[in-house]
């Protein structure tokens, strides 16, 4: 007698069909929760905060016209001087001796001219009476002309000697502040060697240093906001007037000068400042760092189709990397939904459920 295994309960066909209908379809995926940002085009600015100082718009180097030994130097760095004020003096011994010699030569030339003119007058009178020849008159005339020329030369030498003695005293060519002192009493200096540097009263300018980059020329004629590093002084504005043609070898920066606006109350010379400037760099879409992925070795982002809610990988061109994110110049359209969180879990066509956030 054959035995059969016990059978379990058999479900009716109608109940089995219902259970199959309620079961999820094979291969269905759960949408991935991601955060999105909306891409918007906006102007892009390159923001700089640069260190610098307040400098004179015109600095005048001052030196003696002739060389010699300095006997007095009466001003220090930072001193306020007036136009014509005595600043320093050279040893006048040699200049005074030269002046005495030039005066003696001028006196001798004057005496010789007087004698020559008297001789010419006598020769002219004798010639008129027939007591002297024309040749004698011509010789007297020539001697008088030579004596006059010698006197003129002696007078020129006397004027030069007087000027040399006067040049032993160094005076301020303009009112201002002494910013540098390049010599000391007892030092021997040459003609035109700088002894002091004076910053003229009046215009001031800001001098600051900029990293070298291709768009450096855009600084020209831009308005720069200046504020003191220390203190609570009101901010000032300056217009960039000069960009140095060469890069400083020690720092790798470029010197830039800006003229303070007329009427501005400039800080004191040498005041440390911070120059703030924003340079326009066109327009781009500012996005956070977290959107950035790669495709074929280049930058890309994941975008979400607003209708199908599925992911698509798009290569992009990044115009600038900043400490806050990236600026995308090409590759996505205005208003595109870009995945900012969860991009590492996506693949093409992946269904998502999106939560829109701000960049």
Image (cartoon, grey):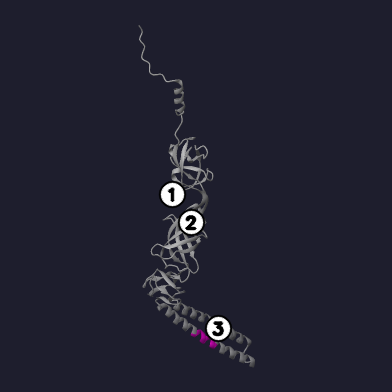
Which of the two residues, 112 or 74, is positioned nearer the viewer here?
A: 74
Which residue does the numbered mark 3 point to in the structure image? 148
Label 2: which residue? 278
Which of the two discs, 2 and 1, sits closer to the camera?
1
Q: Check disc 1 and report the residue beneath it.
A: 324
Q: Residue at x 54, y 86 (%)?
A: 113
Dot 2 and dot 1 residues touching (CB under 8 Å): no
Circle 1: element type: loop
Q: Are marks 3 and 2 in contact (CB under 8 Å)?
A: no
Q: Is residue 352 something that shows in the picture? A: yes
* Front in this rendered view, residue 138 or 224: 224
Q: Which residues are magenta?
A: 107-115
Task: Determine the residue positioned at 42% across, 75% down.
Answer: 81
Label 2 element class: strand
Q: Quarter holding the N terminus?
A: top left
Q: Rounded to the nearest whole Å, what is the CA distance between mark 1 and mark 3? A: 87 Å
Task: Compare residues 267 and 99 and report the one nearer the observer.
Answer: 267
Q: What secondary structure characterizes most of the magenta part? A: helix
| Residue 2 horizontal/vertical position (percent) | 36, 8
Where does residue 64 sit, x and y in percent of width and height? 44, 73
Mark 1 or mark 3: whose residue is earlier in sequence: 3
Cα–Cα gap, marks 3 and 2: 73 Å
């Amino acid at each position: 007698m054959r035995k059969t295994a016990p059978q379990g309960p058999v479900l009716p066909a109608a109940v089995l069909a219902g259970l199959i209908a309620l079961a999820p379809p094979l291969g269905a995926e759960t949408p991935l929760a991601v955060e999105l940002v909306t891409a918007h085009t906006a102007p892009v600015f390159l923001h700089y905060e640069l260190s610098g100082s307040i400098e004179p718009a015109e600095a005048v180097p001052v030196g003696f016209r002739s060389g010699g030994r300095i006997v007095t130097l009466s001003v220090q760095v930072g001193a306020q001087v007036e136009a014509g004020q005595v600043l320093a003096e050279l040893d006048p011994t040699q200049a005074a001796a030269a002046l005495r010699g030039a005066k003696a030569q001028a006196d001798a030339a004057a005496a010789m001219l007087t004698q020559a003119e008297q001789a010419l007058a006598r020769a002219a009178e004798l010639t008129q009476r027939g007591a002297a020849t024309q040749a004698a008159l011509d010789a007297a005339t020539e001697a008088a002309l030579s004596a006059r020329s010698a006197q003129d030369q002696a007078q020129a030498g006397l004027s030069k000697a007087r000027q040399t003695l006067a040049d032993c005293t160094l005076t301020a060519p303009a009112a201002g502040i002494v910013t540098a002192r390049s010599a000391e009493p007892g030092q021997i200096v040459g003609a035109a060697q700088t002894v002091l540097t004076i910053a003229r009263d009046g215009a001031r300018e800001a001098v600051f240093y900029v990293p070298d980059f291709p768009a450096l020329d855009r600084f020209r004629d831009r308005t720069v906001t200046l504020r003191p590093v220390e203190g609570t002084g009101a901010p000032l504005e300056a217009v960039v007037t000069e960009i140095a043609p060469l890069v400083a070898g020690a720092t790798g920066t470029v010197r830039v000068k800006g003229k303070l606006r007329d009427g501005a109350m400039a800080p004191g010379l040498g005041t440390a400042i911070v120059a703030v400037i924003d340079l326009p760099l066109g327009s781009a879409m500012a996005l956070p760092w977290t959107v950035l992925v790669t495709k074929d070795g280049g930058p890309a982002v994941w975008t979400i189709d607003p209708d199908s809610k599925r992911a698509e990988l798009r290569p992009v061109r990044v115009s600038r990397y900043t400490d806050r994110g990236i600026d995308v110049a090409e590759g996505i359209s205005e208003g595109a939904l870009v995945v900012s969180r969860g991009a590492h879990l996506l693949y093409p066509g992946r269904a998502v459920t999106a939560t829109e956030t701000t960049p």
